[in-house]
Image: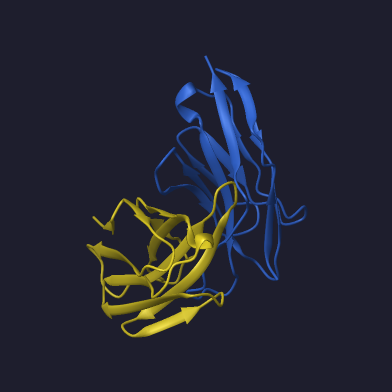
Amino acid sequence: GDSVTQMEGPVTLSEEAFLTINCTYTATGYPSLFWYVQYPGEGLQLLLKATKADDKGSNKGFEATYRKETTSFHLEKGSVQVSDSAVYFCALSKSGGGADGLTFGKGTHLIIQP
Amino acid sequence: SQTIHQWPATLVQPVGSPLSLECTVEGTSNPNLYWYRQAAGRGLQLLFYSVGIGQISSEVPQNLSASRPQDRQFILSSKKLLLSDSGFYLCAWSVLAGGPNTQYFGPGTRLTVL
């Protein structure tokens, strides 16, 4: 079946450092890919998404590129802030549409120190 | 704009007691609705999803059930809670319009079974 693998962390960085959170997936066809962010005690917020190979999703300084050849969707940000501290989830939805649930990675806990 | 509500926000229940969690969506019609559970330190597990009133798909066998009595209402229930039912329960919605199954999450319910 489909699966998503991401580094679990915690990942600890200093403010203004460069961020990369790796995400790879296993799925048939061409799934859509997502990054969600979860702040303490809250639900998940959609951060960005990409629906086909070489698409780049971006939002709030975060970017991720859909790489079909390496089945990856790594999240990057050039300069992180303390407010970026949260848990980040990579997820996919099956190709071909449909209302099935998303398949999530286990989440990466990011800690940004001032 | 669309809004999703969940209640209660937190709940502490004894083992063997019943459960009812409610989720409602505003600002959209005929949404797909989802229940996920997030256990401590783990990713999200899809429990149920629904594509319409009275239509429920179960992803994992367990002592939980779901119902959709109205178009924008989704209820998660149990007759007798187990310790293993503790976790963070998230409701989500999506609307398929020829695009990816982008899901939007509610604020969650923190359930502790003692």
Q: Can residue B44 be seen?
A: yes
Is residue A18 shown to the viewer in this render?
no
Numbered marks: total: 0
Q: How is the image coloured?
A: by chain
Instruction: State the image quarter where residue A51 is shown.
Output: bottom right
Give the x, y percent position of residue A77: 57, 31
Q: Give the answer, above or below, for where B7 lies relative to A83.
A: below
Q: Position of residue A89 (x, y in %)?
A: 56, 48
* Quarter location, residue A9: top right
Look at 48% across and 57% down and name the residue there: B86
Looking at the picture, tell me which residue is in the foreground, A41 or A1: A41
Q: Residue A50 in the image: x percent, y percent?
A: 55, 54
Q: Is residue B19 left or right of residue B101?
A: left
Specify the colour of chain B.
yellow
Which residue, as the protein is rendered here, is positioned at the far bottom?
Answer: B54
Q: Quadrant of the N terminus of chain A?
A: bottom right
Q: Which chain, by letter, is blue? A: A
Q: Residue at x 58, y 56 (%)?
A: A91
Tell me: B69 left or right of A73: left
Give how far across and how far down residue A4 sits, in percent.
Answer: 67, 56
* Residue A62 to residue A94: above or below: above
Specify whether B84 is left or right of B55. Answer: right
Residue at image position (32%, 71%) is B74
